[in-house]
Image (cartoon, helix red, strand yellow):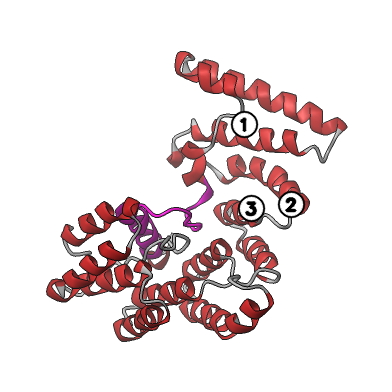
Amino acid sequence: MSQTRNRWIVQVILALAILAFVGVSVIPIIGAFNNTPPSSQNTASTKGSLSPADQKSKLEDEARGYEQVLQREPENQTALKGLLQARLQLLSQKDKSEVKPADIQVVIEPLEKLAKLNPEQSEYSVLLAQAKQQIGDREGAAQAYRSILSTKPGDLKALQGMVALLMSQQRPEAAIGLLQETLSNAAQANTIQPGSVDTVAVQVLLGSVHASQKRYTQASSAYDQAIKKDPKDFRPVVAKAMLLKQQGKDAEAKPLFDSAAALAPAQYRDEIKKAATLPPIPKSAPSSAPSLESKPK
């Protein structure tokens, strides 16, 4: 994995860990394993009493059962979802260092079918893109993201995923171009479908890309534009505070952290205050940005 990709993933994970925001989409699909819901209430009630071997056997039986249903009914969505969950849970039992592309390949087929059957639900296409990226199929991942953005240009999960993919390919200018194009077309898109493009979120993501390249002036400008767009939105305020903190400007960052905490919904305030007291981020890592899907309520 390239150093650039490592830095970008560090940025996103740090944003999750520090700010506890919901819905960042660029975490690799294996990062979702432990959050996969049990495939049935019975599984949930018995999981704690089963040994790992028994759990594995039970999940394998479930997967085979769903496979048999799908042989008769290839588009049975209940079976597709159950098979996907069972296979993800089987993967979650492995140490992440032991997960190979062939292991991830088994979730791609049900994801492809679910994405095709539910084009209005971008989550399946995003997971499909993440899975393809994990097995090294970057073009397949890009196509999955583009399929979402062609009809939903403001879909944040797809935008974040596509940006992360471009960054992993060391193509920051392409990522910046994608985000600038999204912002240029936002007014028209929001006229057709109000609220379809969260311009503040896109500005914050644009700022984080600039920050990852140590273009601090451009990053700060992007955050300032987002703050001007919606002074009551805490996300760009947090992002700018963390940018300043990364540069060692703690005194300038503190009032922004305080302002962000005052603006943020209650469930985020403790995390924002905690972020303000953390040691400076190493200069080799980019500034963190909050997850973009949590807006002030």
Residue 285 seen in the current view: yes
Q: Residue flagged by tag 2: what amino acid is it?
A: Asn
Q: Is residue 150 left or right of residue 76?
A: left
What stretch of residues is rendered in magenta? 7-29
Residue bearing mark 3 = 128
Residue 10 on the magenta segment: yes
**Viewer-side label of 2, 1:** 2
Q: Position of residue 183 (x, y in %)?
A: 54, 81
Q: Secondary structure at mark 3?
A: helix
Of mark 1 and mark 3, the one earlier in the sequence is 1
| Quarter of the picture holding the C terminus | bottom left
| Quarter of the picture holding the N terminus | bottom left
- CA separation in Å, label 2 and label 1: 20 Å
- Residue drawn at x 53%, y 23% is 44
- CA separation in Å, label 2 and label 3: 13 Å
Residue 234 on the magenta segment: no
Q: Position of residue 285 (x, y in %)?
A: 29, 66
Q: Position of residue 113 (x, y in %)?
A: 75, 47
Q: Is residue 61 above or below residue 109?
A: above
Residue bearing mark 1 = 86
Q: For this rendering, which residue is in front, 50 or 169?
A: 50
Q: Residue flagged by tag 3: what amino acid is it?
A: Leu
Quarter of the rendering containing residue 204: bottom left
